[in-house]
Amino acid sequence: MIRDDLDGKRIAVTGSTGFLGTALVERLLRSAPGCELVLLVRAGRMRSVQQRAQREIFRNDCFDRLRAELGGKAAFDELVGRRVTVIEGDVATDGLGLDEAGRALLASCDTVIHSAATVSFDSPLDLAVEVNLLGPTRIAQTLNELGSTAHLVAVSTCYVAGNRRGAAPEILVDQSPFWVDVDWRREVEGARRVRADAEAASRTPARLAELMEEARRELGAAGTPLLAAKTEQRRQTWVKDQLVDAGRARAASLGWPDAYAMTKALGEQALAENRGRVPVSTVRPAIIESAWAEPVPGWIRGFRMAEPVIISYARGLLREFPGVPEGTVDVIPVDLVVGAICAVAARGPANEDGSPDITQVASGSANPLKYERLVNLVQSWFGDHPLYDSAGQPISVPDWGYTSRGRVQGQLERSKHLLERAERALQALPLRGTQARWSAKVEEKRDLAERALTYVELYGAYTACEAIYGVDHLLGLQESLAEADRVEFNMDPRVIDWDHYVHEIHLPSVVKHARVRTDGNRANAENRSDRLRRQVLSPDRQMAAFDLENTLIASNVVTSYAWLASRRLDGDDTLRLTAKLLAEAPQLLRLDRADRSDFLRHFYRRYEGASVEQVREDAAEMLSQLILTKSFPAAIRRVREHRALGHRTVLITGALDFVVAPLAPLFDDIVCASMTIDDQGRYTGQMIDVPPTGESRASALFDFAAAHDIDLAESVAYADSASDLPMLEVVGFPVAVNPETRLSALARKRGWLVEHWSKAPGFTPPRLPLSHAR
Amino acid sequence: MPRPGFVLDVDRSTPPILFHHGEGFRLEKLPAGRSRVLYPAEPLAALDDVDAAIRETLLHPLDSDPLPALLRPGMKLTIAFDDVSLPLPPMRRPDIRQRVIEAVLDMAAAAGVDDVHLIAALALHRRMTEDELRHAVGDRVYDAFAPQGALYNHDAEDPDNLAFLGTTDQGEEVEINKRAAESDLLIYVNINIVSMDGGHKSTATGLASYRSIKHHHNVRTMQHSTSFMDRHHSELHHSNWRMGEVIKNAGVKVFQIETTINNDTFGQSGPMSVLAKREWEWTGRDRATFVAMQAGLKRMKGSTRRKIFNGWQAPYGVTSVTAGAVDPVHERTLAHCFEQHLVEVEGQTDILTLGLPYICPYNVNSVMNPILVMCLGLGYFFNMYRGRPLVREGGVLIMTHPTPWEFHPVHHPSYIDFFEQVLADTTDPIEIEQRYEKQYAEDEWYRHLYRTSYAYHGVHPFYMWYWGAHALQHLGKVIIVGGDTRAVRRLGFKSASTLNDAFEMAEDVVGRHPTITHMKNPPILMADVT
């Protein structure tokens, strides 16, 4: 009995935060009550390994069954406390990054199950090499250093066999007749060099200039600190892309579907060479999917390989996916893999000399699922259970076409480029509000095309892989089990009824996890904007900061100047003033785009010599004649709602104090520009402080919050353009109001609330902001 | 000799009837045999010499010493006058207020009175602009008083300039403009366009604060004013009269001047004159004018149309000027009003139809928003009755008006929020009053806009709703023809695209072959229902 074999054993597990690892920990705790577990967990950036284990392992619904069987959370926590020790460790570091206590604990283990891997199919080459290739070797070396001869069960993948047709039996990788003899050490060096080269290439002046330009295109005049951060982020992404490409290219050149399979294969080879006195067993699962029976049918964790493809198809995004109808999709439910691993661990090394024995856990040879059958099952299921679009309409699934990868990729590439061009063209236009939503549509489409393309690139290779994985060892192992174990630790793929599995287990589970709309009922699902609005208007918020121009009113500093200036002019002079302003408009616009503060400084000189008393008097009238006529009633209502909720309301604007003075009753505080006054009571045209624009708005907000003991993370900011990004970014709840294209795109990406506010309907304010001469 | 108003029974030969429809018109054929149309009286003869009539009544007032005898040097004199909400549409220059005020000021000057203030008695309405004040009092008066700060708008939210005068026997607080209350003589200059205006309501409402006005501007009072156009059956007026008593007892001496105008709203010639004619009397020229007007209006942008209609000033003739003590003056004024407006009608009707025009008291030089549409139809027009409502209890009211979802951002800020927040929640007047009134009435921002900009008081949209409370309680259904469906629905009414559809919908409530009465207003008429 496996439970007896593991009784009193201490088992170390790596990768326990992953899909397979979590299921493994659960099974060992539930079905092998006599064993103890030592979990090697990487420390998170913010959390200790204990916190991480609690959050990412034991809170998972995988343990619901065990929790229930034990009679509640307390009993479960007690069990975990008694049988599980979590230690910090990282298989990507030599010596596994263990401290002394960790080393001692590892040395005391009887078995080590290594399931840590970077399974993401688009991980950068160097990361895949460090984790997948060198990881197993590092564990073996550490055990040897510690004088341990614990049994190492290494989880690999069937795909180490590479892209090929025909049988792929359970043999060592280099024993295959198709093995291309490469030295794994060279590959390690190569990967590290690619990283160094890419890092260097990303720092050349030309590349940096390009990255800065991209950042500016995305954010606009957002100010130096934000642009710098964005540029650096883009650089890192660029380096990563280089490494992903390098990995895919290297894997393809050696006949593997991707860097994951390649590094796993080389990792097996390296482990065989470096295992020292440690006996090794290798378990190679195929594509692991949701559970057949244990802990509950359909249990799955994370969004895995096939799910994005299935959901994209159900949403009508993917019409074609490369593959041949008669090809085999080698899917294996996670609980069967767990059963095999437990059985291997209980059995111990198969070879007397401790050299690696191989067990493949796959369905392709014993109980194959053909691609065509899978497609038919998926199609018929979504026919009966359609997803719903945002308008609450069911989405009908397309007939799945079988085609070659090249063709699909070509199509997708073309539409992606076309959409990219359209998007760029739209971004260059000065659009706002509703019009800006066109670009949202284009962007959304481009996004879809891009995502579909990624899936095809990533997973297409697997559907082209027509190898049939032998499972003789697996079936033999199942045979050798006691009667009860054959059920409890089942690993036999022949038990799977694919129709039942796809229709009743896998798809319902996938749809549930994908959080997609599965009914057309709009009332139930709170729409995203409503939810965000509710957060923004929660009594927990502390402050609401507002920009003025185009956020509260459809007006700007030039308009208010024109109004004030024309108030004391007769008809002809008004005409001249208008002509002058219009002539200057292009220059002003340029200046404004380049640097808002410079523009304001330059523009406010016009007020030089204006009588303070007169301007203040006129500004009071301007509230009714200009500002209110151009105001957004919904915006003013929002300010008032915030006030009513007890939030501190703040106006932060580059406009002049006398312009905003009539709005004072709306706000607790106003941060604005002001000018010095000479001894004759006239404005000098010089600003007292730097007007709060760009980054200085963020710091103004920061200072304000500090001075009033306000938590910015609990505050809301409203603004309309990308140049307000610094202000929006410092608060926890940014709101984009009538955003121009660029901010609109950013707001969508970041999940910010977007408000479209308009002037009072039916009232047409005067076309020109000119006052009647009195 | 002007013809009186009358009731036309619609038969198969009756031509289509003209319905007002906001800044436009409709011609509607009413079902023969069961429909009738109420026509207003033709304009009564105007006074030949208005100035002489003014002098005459100032020298021979009712139950009062002649005005010159009330004036003496060193006294504090305040002249209050009706605001921009009267008359509708505005009157061609010279405005009757200007004529009366000039006559009063002449006498004051002759008597050596030099402490004179002129106050626009606007209660919780928006402040009048300089142009509007100039139109009401004339340039001569404006230039003589405004620069010194002696001509201004009443401010119901200025705590320093309100005087509390006491409470009525029913606990109603009376608080009015301090300058008016502390003057040796308060002269109130009215334009009594309908029988609701004037009397003690002039001072007790026009110069009062929210604290005081809320005692009669509420749902209970309005539901017990049947109708508020009928002073002796109006709880609104009873309350104002009680307050008038308190004002008198507090020592405030009011010299009331009331004026009435005739029905000459659209002129005897010119493009608008066709609106005052009876359809079967239209000449070929009238018909051509109407067709051309319709075609022209259709082509215009909404804002242009509004500008044209807002620009119309009526050539009203003045039919009476009466001065003296409030009660006798008002009784005489009522007689003049009724002489022009009352039309005898026999029996109630199942369906009342109304063509709502482009203007109501609260959108002069402004936008007629949906809340004002409700108030004009269910408030003012529905209440244009004496005796009992023109439509039976449980009957249907059908109104034609485009009811656009439009608002004036400066004049009606609290209306916008009322429409977006309050009406989105409930249309029940009692619930609205209980849950929302206080919050809007005491709102700091609305107060700021009322006092410094040109906004109606925060509570004003509530009063619009209360004004229709009696009708809401009485009616079985309200249908708006040709309105913005969304806006109509927000008001809690039903929307129909044609009058015939509306009749179909009404049958659900009043049954097959209902009787229909169309009240052709304006020019103004008041149904005397027996």
Image: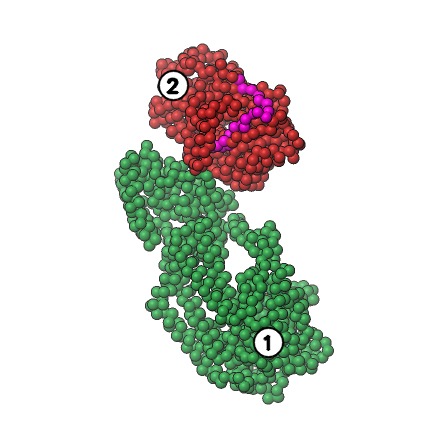
Chain colours: A green, B red
Q: Quadrant of residue A306?
A: bottom right
Rendered location of residue B464, percent (x, y): 53, 32
Numbered tag placed on residue B102 in the rendering: 2
Please, is residue A499 above or below residue A568 in the view? below
Amino acid carrying mark 1 in the image: Pro
Rendered location of residue B35, percent (x, y): 60, 26
Q: Quadrant of residue A520?
A: bottom right
As for residue A93 lying within the magenta part, the answer is: no
Q: Are marks 1 and 2 in contact (CB under 8 Å)?
A: no
Q: Residue at x 49, y 66 (%)?
A: A453
Q: Which residues are magenta?
A: B4-25
* Real-space Cα separation, disc 1 to disc 2, in angstroms: 103 Å
Does residue A210 appear to the left or right of A114 in the view shown?
A: left
Q: Which residue is mark 1?
A: A285
Q: Residue at x 50, y 22 (%)?
A: B281
As for residue B15 lying within the magenta part, the answer is: yes
